[in-house]
Image (spheres, grey):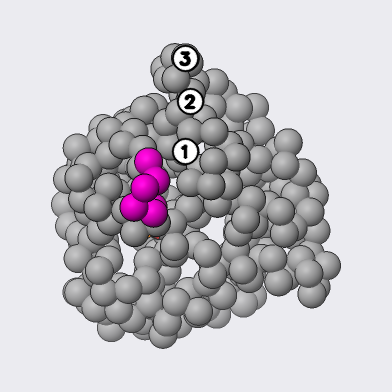
Amino acid sequence: MQVIILEDPEQVAQHASQWVLELIAKKAKPVLGLATGSTPINLYKKLVKSHQEDQIDFSHVTSFNLDEYHNIDADNAQSYRSFMKENLFDEINIDQKNTYLPTCYQNENPRRQGLAFEEKIQHAGGIDLQILGIGANGHIGFNEPSSSLSSRTRLKTLTQQTLKDNSRLFKADEYQPTMAMTMGISTILDARYVLLMATGKNKAKAVNEMITGALSAKCPASALQLHEHAIVVLDKAAASELTHQEYYIWADKEHQKINQTYGFFL
Ligand code: GLP
């Protein structure tokens, strides 16, 4: 894992945006894996700014989101489609026909839907760069603790902790779905690069477990230990419980020289 510790959430977003911008500049048909949650919002703001101020083109980009609530209409304000439209898709020139979320409605078979989503990813040539956040319980996407490390896109029931953590985003009278379709851990590991962003003290414990803990379904994010190109970008608060911080800071300085010369991607 490449662990990058930065000052604050602003720097984390800035760093992550450099990866995305390099990818879309380098590849003819880049495929981005996207995430929701509060953490990537600043990254999306940077991408919107790069489009508006520097005329960065997103028309050739295809995207796949990690997850979507079960049986929620795309135009429902709480759908992840709405989140992505508001924070990114409506603000850049991506062709929204090429933006995919793993939807599943009441009368659809979640197994079929999961398989169809996996096939779409394959058909697009696989995900080049998957953006991730992390739950306070170590989840990635909606792969809650105990998720199979070999899982693929499927329907998951959310844990009480996740429902509580995310309840801040729902009004008192608003229905909060308890199930979601999510890319599986294997789906995420198939991406060529994964970039996980974490900010804030409430992520510090999960971050330490992901990086230095045992590879275990107890902390689904620990599966990233198996990935050849996993980049973890943290602010100081999220890194505060991480052992060997000085090593990561030193190693990152060495990496920076290589990145400046050769770029981030192979
Ligand atoms: C949500 C999403 C995850 C996200 C996580 C953290 O439940 N399914 O993809 O990474 O929780 O969210 P936040 O960034 O708001 O802390």
Residue 155 shown in magenta: no
Percent across and percent down for residue 158 are 27, 39
Q: Which residue type does callout 3 highlight? A: Asn
Query: Which residue position is annotated with label 1?
Result: 68
Give me the residue at 48% from left, 25% from top.
104
How far apart, in angstroms, are the residues tagged by discs 1 and 3?
A: 16 Å
Percent across and percent down for residue 198 are 37, 66
How far apart, in angstroms, are the residues tagged by discs 2 and 1?
A: 8 Å
Residue 86 in view: yes
Percent across and percent down for residue 119 are 56, 23
Stretch in magenta: 170-175
Mark 3 element type: loop
Query: Which residue position is annotated with label 3?
Result: 107
| Quadrant occupied by the C terminus | bottom right
Give me the residue at 34% from left, 52% from top.
172
Q: Quadrant of residue 230?
A: bottom left
Query: Which residue position is annotated with label 2?
Result: 104
Q: Which residue type does callout 2 highlight? A: Cys
Residue 160 drawn above or below residue 151: below
Residue 187 in view: no
243 lies left or right of 68: left
